[in-house]
Structure formats: structure tokens, C-alpha cells
Image (cartoon, helix red, strand yellow):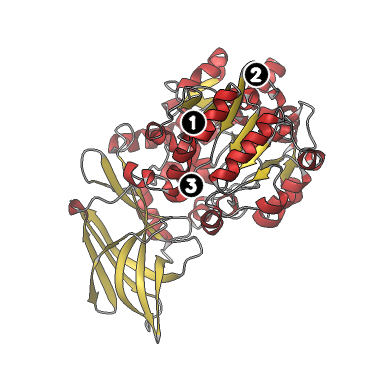
Amino acid sequence: MSEDAREIKVKTGKFSLRKGKLKICFSPYDENVKIKELFLKKRHALEDVCVPFQLDRKGSGYEARMELEYRELEYAFWDVVAVVEDGAEVYQAILGGQSVSLKMRLILFPRWYRTNRDSIIYPFVNGSRQFTIQSRKYNRGYDSYGFLWKEYLALLCYFLLKPYWDHKKLWLVCEKFCTMAQDNGLYFFRYCMEELPEQEKKHILYVIDKKAPDYQAVQKYDKNVIQFMSFRYLIYLCAAQYLISTDAIRHFYIWDSPNSVFKVLYQARKDIIFLQHGVMAFKQCHRTYHKWGGNRMKLFVTSSEYEQDIIYNYFEYDREEIIITGLPRWDVLHDTSSREHKEILLMPTWRGWLEDASEEAFCNSEYFTNYEALLKNEELHRILEQYEITLNFYIHPKFRAYIGQFHADSSRIRLIPFGEQPLNQLLMSCQMLITDYSSVAWDVYYQEKPIVFFPFDFATYQQVQGSYMDLEKEAFGDVVHTLPELLHVIRKYVENGFQEEDAYAHRRDYLLPLRDGRNSERIYERIKAAKPGKKLNIREKLKL
């Protein structure tokens, strides 16, 4: 269901998850409404996918039961949805209005169920106080009661010596899932390590899993690199003055981990500096990063007054919280393209409705069929061969598991798995970019190279995701919707030597005014000048 779906507020009494049997006892606040059915509904699915509960009336309330051991829920978030009869009206509504006490019970005493050796299901109350179930792959390292004890021990060590740890005034920097070092987090951290005096940089640490391939990008600064989810890191995460990231606060911890008291405590106390990983324009996410939501930012990095207006109008931050600095990675961005080795970069973004999709569902999607058709197109092959061009297809990290499903019958096409080659290198070495809604378009635009937008699923994307920039009217590159149109525009740019059109170039000073190589410096100075914000207490955080 969408984030704007209807909700029915209920009082949840008994709840249990034992031996694969899920039971929820609840009663509506409004005694006049009747619950006709109850089921789990897959979130962000284009078509309804539902799993029914057995629902019985118990006095003035209801008892819903489901035997999970006989079900294989797809990996996804599942909302608990009721069919509600209210007078003459019948409608679907998410089970909401959950109490802080229920949320706290699920945090203090997390519970989960292993459906088989590789899958796990667990309940929680989300930020909107709605009852939610998640099904995902089992993580052997973190999905255990032993790891919960590690969390509690880290909290004990932190609070016993709190003045000592807090005095360090730590800044922790990370990128997506704490496995990456190739985006704005890396370049801001690198600036700090290479340009700041020893006394100023000693408290700035980069967080990464040292088994990740990207660790080599920060290895030379190893004394300022900390192992993700180590015992020391758990203490430092509690003590940190600022968390500086390209993504939401959840990326500083195990992705999609069950709720725990440790997570609530560190999230309640942190000031976040949001570096972003692209200009906010093509993808609506103000619900995720709204000022009054669970991912509230201390400072929100932007690149222009145009983008600042978007954050001000949709995210409701004050102007002084939205800093116009430019992105750190642009400080080292320069054109390395070559006439002898011409390259086109094809880099689409992800789709929320295809996250965690099975291989079969992914391969039947409009997304897959369009890009597979392009990669196999004989006219494209002829263009690449005739003009001796390489096409690099680089899939979004959230879809990296599906790269093996794509095929290209041309030696001129490279299918590049995520992490095999730094994205910055591909952006600098290309002559042109083909994308749909990816923010990397701004990096290529920064370099004065042509961009072609291929939003073949525009209507669906607008309905499910939405954008702030009107692609049809405001895009700084050609917009095409069909494969023949795309091939025509590719040939146009190939034959004119990849020259950007004047109509798009003339807007650059307005959309990207800061191109002086000092973005990281501006960000560092703004963080230093910032005043500590009000820390949310646990009760306030639980209400988010």
C-alpha cells in the first residue's frame, strides 16, 4: 500500500510469535466499525499480493492467527491490512495507532521466526506506529540473541564511561550499507585526511566493513578507519557528535535488522549531516527525509538555490539548515574521455516496486525487458561497431544481484557488476550518459557532456515514486520514451562528436553554480560552525 493509504487505529492486546504461529489480538478504537477480513499485504507491489489471517471475533475485539511455518512470504515489508465496514462504507486500511508500550515491548524483547535455514520473519511497529512484518534473508552474523547481548554490553561500556567517550567529539562518515567508499562520503573524508591538521582530523573516522572491495579506497588512512559493527564501533556510534552520510541513519547499522534498544538509543541522540548521493530532483523522497520524520537531518547539503527551494518546500527544513555547498565528489570530477577510446555510459536507477523481487519477477518486469532489448538491439550494435564505441552498462547497487540476467551479443558492450569499477571513473571517462531518473545525470551535466533520459515507464514511476523536476519541461538533456527514439538520439550525438546542445548548456550556471573545487571545504566549515541540536529522548523517538 502507498504511504498515504488509509489507516484504522486499534488497541493491540495480546501478541505472540511462537513456533511459526503468529497471533494478534486487537480491538478498534471506534466500536461502531467492523473488521471483515485481515491479511498481510506486500508493500510497494504493482499488483496486490495478500496472505490472509484466520480472523475470529472475541468479545468486543478480534483474534487473528496465521501459521507462518506453512508459508513462504516473499522477501519484502508486509503491512497488516483490514477490510473495514463502517456503516455503508467498506474499505481497506492498515492496522495503525499502535501504542508506544507495544513498540517498546518489541524493541526490548525482539522476536523472530526462521521459516527455513535461509529466511527470517519478524514483526515491528514502524515510524507511523503501524503494525508491520518483514520477511528477508537470514543473516547468520547478526540475527541471534548472542548479538543482542553484544549490543547490551556495548551500551553498558558506553554509559559507564560516558564523559570519556563523549569528550572525543567523534565524527563518523559512511556510505551506503557501510560497504562503499566511492561517493560523497569518501571524497569528504579524503579532504579531511589530506587537508586538515592532525589535531582536527584525529576525531574523524570512516566506517566500513573491511572485507568490502571498497576498503582499498580508504586503506591508506587506516588509523582513521573503523570496522563496521565491531564492539569499538558500537561504543563510538553511541558517542559520536555527528554522523555524516550519503544516506539515511539506518545505513550506520545492520540493514533491515530487527528493532533493538541499541538502535533506538543511537538514533535518538544523533545529529546527521546529509551529504546526499546526488541532486534531489528526479526522485521524491520527502517522506523519508522529512524534517519531522525518523531521518531528521542537522544539515542538508544541496548544490543550488533551485535544489534548496525543493528541500524547503517539500521537506520543510529551515533555510539555514539547507546548506548550498555542492557535492564533495565534484571536487575531483574532471573529463577523462578520449577520442581514441569513446565510451557511452548506460546507468539506470532502481525501482522501489522491484526491490527484493525474485529473478523470475525481475526478468518479467518492464525494467528488464526494455534494457535487455536495448542491449541486444542490432542497430545499436552497428552504431557501436561503426564508430568504435564501448557501451558500459552499470546497474544500480540495489539491483546488483540481477546483473547476470542481462545479455549482450556484442563485444562493444560491457556489463559491469557493481563494485568492479568505481562509478566516478565511468562518469569521467564517458562521452555521453543514457539514464532514466538517476541523479548521476548531474555529474555528467557538470562535465558539460550530453545526457539522454529514457523514462520508458514514466507513468508508473510518477504514480509510485514521483519527481520534483518536470522531466518533459525542465530536463537538461533529450527525453525519449521508446527504443527507436533512443537509437535516433544516440546516432545524433555520435555523429556530432558528442556535442551538448546549447539549450541545455545555458541552464548550467543556474542549476550548478558552484564549480570551483571547494565543496568539501565549504561543508567542513559549515559543520564546524554548527551548534549542537536538541537530542530526542527515547519517548520522542518512539513516537516518530
Q: In this picture, is 350 found above or below 335? A: below
Q: Disc 3 vs disc 2: which is toward the camera?
A: 3
Tell me the SS state at disc 3. loop
State how far apart marks 2 and 1 are (Cα): 19 Å
**Please, what is the three-letter code of the amino acid marked with disc 2?**
Met
Among numbered discs 1 and 3, the one appearing first in the sequence: 1
**Please, what is the three-letter code of the amino acid marked with disc 3?**
Arg
Q: Quadrant of residue 452?
A: top right
Q: In this picture, is 42 found above or below 535? A: below
Report if the CB atoms under discs 2 and 1 are less than 8 Å apart: no
Dot 1 crowding, Cα within 10 Å, few <14, some 14–19, many 20+:
many
Residue to which mark 1 is pinned: 178
Residue to which mark 2 is pinned: 193
Say left or right for 324 vs 78.
right
State how far apart marks 1 and 3 are (Cα): 22 Å
Residue 105 picture location, percent across and down: 35, 54
Residue to which mark 3 is pinned: 351
Residue closer to the observer: 131 or 529: 131
Q: Disc 2 vs disc 1: which is toward the camera?
A: 1
Dot 2 crowding, Cα within 10 Å, few <14, some 14–19, many 20+:
some
Residue 55 picture location, percent across and down: 24, 70
Residue closer to the observer: 105 or 226: 226
Q: Disc 1 vs disc 3: which is toward the camera?
A: 3
Residue 429 picture location, percent across and down: 63, 22
The residue depicted at 40 percent of the width and 87 percent of the height is 88
Tell me the SS state at disc 1. helix
